[in-house]
Image: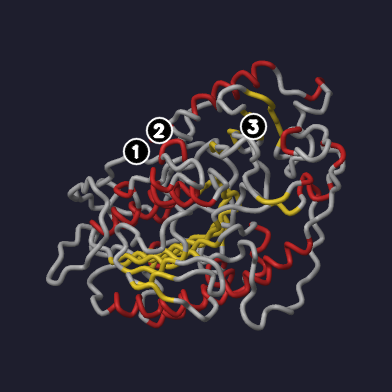
Amino acid sequence: MADGKTRHRVARRVSIACMAMALVGSTVAVTAEATTVERKSGARAIVAREDAPNVLIIVTDDQRPDMMDHMPRTQRLFGRRGVRFERAFATTPVCCPFRASLMTGQYAHNSGVRRNNDRAKLNHGHTIQRYLHEGGYRTALLGKFLNGWRSEDPPPYFERFVLGSGYYRDRPVNVDGRMRNISQYLPYFLGKRAKRVLEDFERDDADPWLMIITPSSPHSPATPAPGDEAVRIAKWLGNPAAFEEDLSDKPPMLYPNNTPDGVEAIPGTRAYNKAARALMGADRLVQRVFKTVNALGEGSNTLAFFMSDNGLLMGEHGLRLKRYPYPMSQEIPLFMRWPAGGVPKGETDDRIVANIDVLPTVLEAAGLDDVLVHDVDGLSLHGSEQRNRLLLEHFSESHRQVPSWASLITDEEQYTEYYDLDEETVTFTEYYDTVADPWRLTNVLGDDDPLNDPGPATLLTLRTQLAADRACAGSNCP
């Protein structure tokens, strides 16, 4: 395989090269120790470009990409006013590693946050909030930060924040440094608080702002908003993977309580419907935030993203939950809009993209891409540059969990290796023709039919490339 960051011609449904901009690079002082932001009075130097956009990032929790139909308001705001990325991935489909990769633009093996309990390994000086704050942005975080982060501890480089997860009175919430018990539906409270914070930011209209909103919706227990408990949901009919009967080609270690061919293939319709109802409240949250943004006159020059931190299997391949290298677990919804920045409206983009691409996209738009103090693995979504492959990786937290694995995704294939506890010894491999078999129904390396296996040279190339990518950094990454 060639370098993963080459420019090559493939069929695309939209080109967003019109977003290329003349950027002004600036340098900021590097803070070695991550500290809590305290806004100081008086003038402050703005090192971002003069017309730098506001940045809004909304991240749902465990939302499959096929659930966007239950968020009509969000689809109108982003789908009609921006770009939908058809092939978007969580590079590590687990909550805490995803969020660290989003904030740093790095794969989990470089951010250091490989597992849900690795929050202490995040270098806060390498995050989007640090770069934008030092570049003159006002910064706010509303919702979930990192797994296990103490609510009492302010998140570094955010001057305004609401730290809390769940739906109703799950635990005290930290609101700008004061612990409070919130009686109302928490996703609605986040929207209400976002309105207040944005209005406060707009009193100093000279400074752009960054706001990250991370509701728990539709994470288990997928509690719906008041009034949505009994809303009728069209029965989920499943997909080919949810009705897969022969699982003998799949990794046997994924089925510890059953033989691979003894797992009953039943779509998780009930779980799907619960999650769909929980997303209705998140949909109203998105609408409320944009109503505020537009009322403040900032709708045009706000670079906004909507995405999920990972998907969730609901019976596909006889499996539940996340952490798997299969569609609906690793794939995520991802939208981007920025009217003033030339982002096309109502279009789709079929490039392979991921959460690691958000930070370089934002820093380029803000004119801060020259101030980086760490290697970024992702690509800016501006322009037409595209990768020819993407690395996906998962790091097991215990021998009872989904094992560690690494996977390569290209335009036409997916190759995956599962590892023993040493994260090096290969215990099982998968290969799928993603064009002919988009639902990963036939692992040709595990179906006992050598005639459909890829050739030895192809497998050697894939194994060699995957080994290199697992150790990649910066521009050497796909």
Per the image, the residue denoted by label 3 is 416
Q: Quadrant of the N terminus?
A: top right
Q: Which mark is residue 375?
A: 1
Residue occupying the point 51% across, 47% down? 116
Q: Secondary structure at mark 3?
A: strand
| Gap between marks 2 and 3 measured at Cα | 20 Å
Local crowd size for mark 2, using a 10 Å CA cut-off: few (<14), some (14–19), many (≥20): some
> What percent of the width, then of the height, locates residue 34?
27, 51
Q: Counting residues from the N terminus, which is met first, the one under dot 2 or under dot 3?
A: 3
Please state if 30 lies on the left or on the right of 143 as rendered.
left
Instruction: Identify which residue is drawn at 39% across, 69% down.
Output: 174
The residue to which callout 2 is attached is: 473
Judge the density around disc 3: few (<14), some (14-19), many (≥20) Cα neighbours within 10 Å: many
For this view, does 96 lie left or right of residue 332?
left
Residue 201 point in image, percent of width and height: 29, 75
Give SS at disc 2: loop
Which label's residue is closer to the chain start, 2 or 1? 1
> Mark number for residue 88?
none
**Which three-letter amino acid code belongs to the residue tagged 2?**
Ala
Mark 2 and mark 1: Cα distance apart in space? 7 Å
Please state which amino acid type lies under the numbered disc 1.
Asp
Which of the 4 image quadrants contains residue 272? bottom right
Q: Nearer the viewer, residue 405 or 90?
A: 405
Judge the density around disc 1: few (<14), some (14-19), many (≥20) Cα neighbours within 10 Å.
some
Q: Are marks 2 and 1 in contact (CB under 8 Å)?
A: yes
Taking depth in this image into account, of 403 and 29 the one nearest to the observer is: 403
> Vertical placement of 433 versus 319: above or below?
above
User: Viewed as shown, does residue 330 lie left or right of 204?
Assistant: right
Q: Looking at the image, can residue 436 be seen?
A: no
Q: Please, what is the three-letter code of the amino acid marked with disc 3?
A: Thr
Q: How many marks?
A: 3
Residue 147 drawn at (x, y percent):
48, 54
